[in-house]
Image: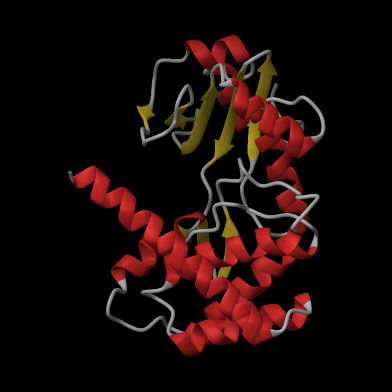
């Protein structure tokens, strides 16, 4: 189905491409496949759609196939209702937009049994990872401003009880001086160990922003976050740094195994 808030010419483009139905989405053969490790039965495709006025519209199509039982049970435990991954992510995008933490737009989606699809509009801006790679060895324009933006982004999500679970620089987009999140498939609202999940999100951000934010900038981020969350800043900083170090060790182990 196409989201009710999608207007012309995008609505007609989605219908013409067959993206208004599940069968049409799975039959689509155009576009550029975006492959990465551990996708399993999932497929991601970048599509360029041109309207009657010659304007280009970039959208991303996610297609979900059958999943292992373990993945289905985990999602049932997280969401308390049996719901497929396409509907979960579409719902997460709506929730995140309401919280002001994303500029993503879900254009169309559908789920029948273990097959599902989701069409997402291209997000404005560029990831901090990509921007940071271009700034390697240089200073961000205003590191303290960026730290404040990231702290506010994290707390708007966490303060509402949600966590991202992939809070890396590659999933934080900067656009017109504001930051927002993408890749919301794993976002959820934990019922237990909320602080543990919040620390994990912040550790992922710490690990991935380590080259681009100085220690002074990061300290400001933690202090700003703690002033909202009620955490003791030094204790929170130590928890984040310990988890960040574990993430780094895990990444190093995987790299060593891959090189053998």
What residue appears at the point 59 percent right and 80 percent down from the top-left corner? 237
Task: Using the image as rendered, state which of residue 229 and residue 21 is in the foreground.
Answer: 229
Task: Using the image as rendered, state which of residue 122 and residue 96 is in the foreground.
Answer: 96
Say which quarter of the image contains residue 108: top right
Q: Position of residue 43 (x, y in %)?
A: 45, 26
Say which quarter of the image contains residue 80: top right
Display colour scheme: secondary structure
Where does the N terminus fall, quadrant-wise? top right
Q: Position of residue 206 (x, y in %)?
A: 49, 70
Is 243 left, or right, of 30 in this rendering? right
Is 95 left, or right, of 70 in this rendering? right
Q: Position of residue 199 (x, y in %)?
A: 63, 66
What residue appears at the point 40 percent right and 81 percent down from the top-left corner? 140
Q: Is residue 68 visible?
A: yes
Q: How many marks?
A: 0
Judged from this view, the residue extending furthest toward the left is 260
Judged from this view, the residue extending furthest toward the bottom is 216
What residue appears at the point 63 percent right and 15 percent down from the top-left corner? 114
In the displayed structure, 61 sits above or below 149; it is: above
Q: Position of residue 232 (x, y in %)?
A: 72, 84
Q: Is residue 223 visible?
A: no
What residue appears at the point 30 percent right and 68 percent down from the top-left corner? 134
In the displayed structure, 135 sits above or below 189; it is: below
In the displayed structure, 139 sits above or below 202; it is: below
Where does the C terminus fall, quadrant-wise? top left
Say which quarter of the image contains residue 195: bottom right
């Amino acid at each position: 189905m196409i989201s009710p808030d999608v207007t012309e010419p995008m609505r007609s483009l989605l219908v013409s491409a067959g993206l208004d139905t599940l069968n049409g989405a799975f039959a689509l053969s155009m576009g550029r496949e975006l492959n990465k490790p551990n996708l399993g039965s999932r497929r991601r495709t970048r599509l360029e759609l041109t309207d009657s006025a010659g304007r280009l519209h970039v959208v991303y199509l996610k297609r979900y196939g059958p999943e292992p039982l373990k993945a289905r049970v985990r999602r049932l435990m997280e969401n308390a209702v049996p719901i497929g991954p396409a509907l979960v992510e579409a719902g997460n995008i709506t929730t995140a937009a309401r919280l002001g933490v994303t500029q993503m737009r879900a254009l169309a989606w559908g789920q029948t049994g273990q097959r599902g699809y989701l069409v997402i509009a291209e997000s404005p801006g560029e990831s901090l990872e990509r921007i940071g790679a271009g700034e390697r060895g240089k200073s961000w324009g205003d590191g303290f401003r960026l730290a404040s933006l990231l702290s506010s982004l994290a707390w708007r999500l966490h303060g509402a009880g949600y966590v991202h679970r992939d809070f890396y620089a590659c999933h934080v987009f900067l656009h017109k001086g504001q930051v927002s999140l993408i890749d919301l498939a794993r976002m959820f609202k934990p019922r237990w160990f909320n602080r543990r999940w919040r620390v994990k999100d912040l550790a992922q951000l710490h690990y991935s922003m380590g080259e681009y934010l100085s220690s002074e900038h990061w300290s400001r981020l933690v202090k700003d976050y703690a002033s909202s969350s009620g955490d003791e800043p030094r204790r929170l900083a130590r928890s984040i740094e310990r988890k960040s170090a574990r993430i780094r060790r895990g990444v190093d182990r995987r790299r060593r195994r891959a090189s053998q």
